[in-house]
Amino acid sequence: MSSLSFNKFFFRFFPVPKFLSTPSFGLDISDESLKFIELINTRDGIRVGRHGERNIPQGIIESGKIKDPKRMEEILSLLKREEGLKFVRASLPEAQVYLFKLRLEKTGLVNVRESIEFSLEEHIPISAQDTIFDYELLSEDTQSLDLQVAAIPKNVIENYLAIFRDTQISVVSLELEAQAIFKAVIKKGDLETYMIVDFGEKRTGIFIISHGVVMFTSTLDVGGVMLTEMIAKNFKVSFAEAEKMKKKYGLQRNTENKEIFSVLLNSVSILRDELVKHFLYWHTHKDETGKNNPPIKKIILCGGDSNLTGLADYFSVSMKTKVEMANVWVNIVDTETYIPEIDFKQALSFAAALGLALGNFDND
């Protein structure tokens, strides 16, 4: 593994002042909401501090791009006043990040970063001068280097930093959302291969993690809201009533209202098909060296709508693989001795924010 880390993504370009060692909030930003959480180091171990969620009205952020900076500044300024945010570790929008593997021959290689820059436009649809990138060293032999490269449009980074600067909130780090979730739900030091499915309100993130590196990300426009809307349409009930029905029955065949199972299955099967596609691709395609990818050990579900009754079982049976709900506290607290204020179901939607907040406790 190289000394470069996606945990410190892009801060070679935007260095953080050394005095910023104050504990910070993990701030997970999506198109629909801000989720924030503070982790505090106490004599009894890590404890949960201030936390919560704020809605982001439609049109302010679209597919990770800030479309209305002024309104976004208003939301952050209010959050700063209400919760005392001064320092944050924030997520970067997965929809705007490009990930790819790159092999560099050592012959004639002088500067790794320059060599990556020369290769960028072969792999991403934006020019090198408009891109910020970082990399992880996956493996190396006498002839070559195998790298995992992450790139993002420079203007996306600059727009996020401008929002924080104008609201006088200091950014301690910017991290890939997938990397933040991985830090929260996979035991530190575990180098196995996993598929993480972040099932949110309007979108689902699909990530493959292997040897501690984010190898693949995809975003699908399927989420919990879509399931609720399908119930509301089919049963001619309000959105609020449909949400209650979804939570009560979920994907259960033997319920008093079996029709709900069929309605939900239509939408959930779309997500299942995407998981199968990426699962099979990972297992059937070889890497740049001609080796098979390591097998996915299991699928881990997180996100606010991942606790839909029967969802994990449905994926497990239909995909014939192990599927389990994430434990977002695995690297934070022993829930046998301390019960965080956030209940298990709510905590699933805070996976990224918790992974970000854990950055305060990294010893790297």
Image: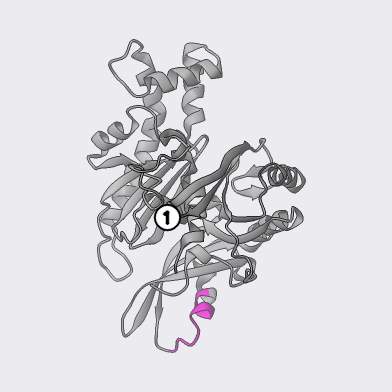
- Specify start and end residues of the magenta stretch as a single range: 108-116
Q: Give the position of the N terminus as an image quadrant.
A: bottom left
Q: How many marks?
A: 1
Residue 45, percent across and down?
A: 43, 53
**Residue topped by disc 1:** 183
* Residue closest to the far front: 43
Q: Which of 77/246 is in front?
A: 77
**194 to 8, vertically: above or below:** above
In the displayed structure, 121 sits above or below 347; it is below
Asked whether 342 or 129 is in front, the reply is 342
Residue occupying image coordinates x 51% and y 29%: 225
Asked whether residue 49 appears in the rendered view, the answer is: yes
Left or right for 201, reference 71: left
**Residue 32 showing in the rendered view:** no
237 left or right of 209 in image: right
Left or right of 81, for residue 229? left
Callout 1 amino acid? Lys
Describe the element under mark 1 as helix, strand or loop: helix
Q: In the image, is residue 114 part of the stretch drawn in magenta? A: yes
How does the figure colour the protein chain or chains? one colour
Q: Is residue 97 magenta?
A: no
Residue 347, x across and y down, in percent: 45, 39
Horizontal and vertical percent position of residue 283 = 27, 54
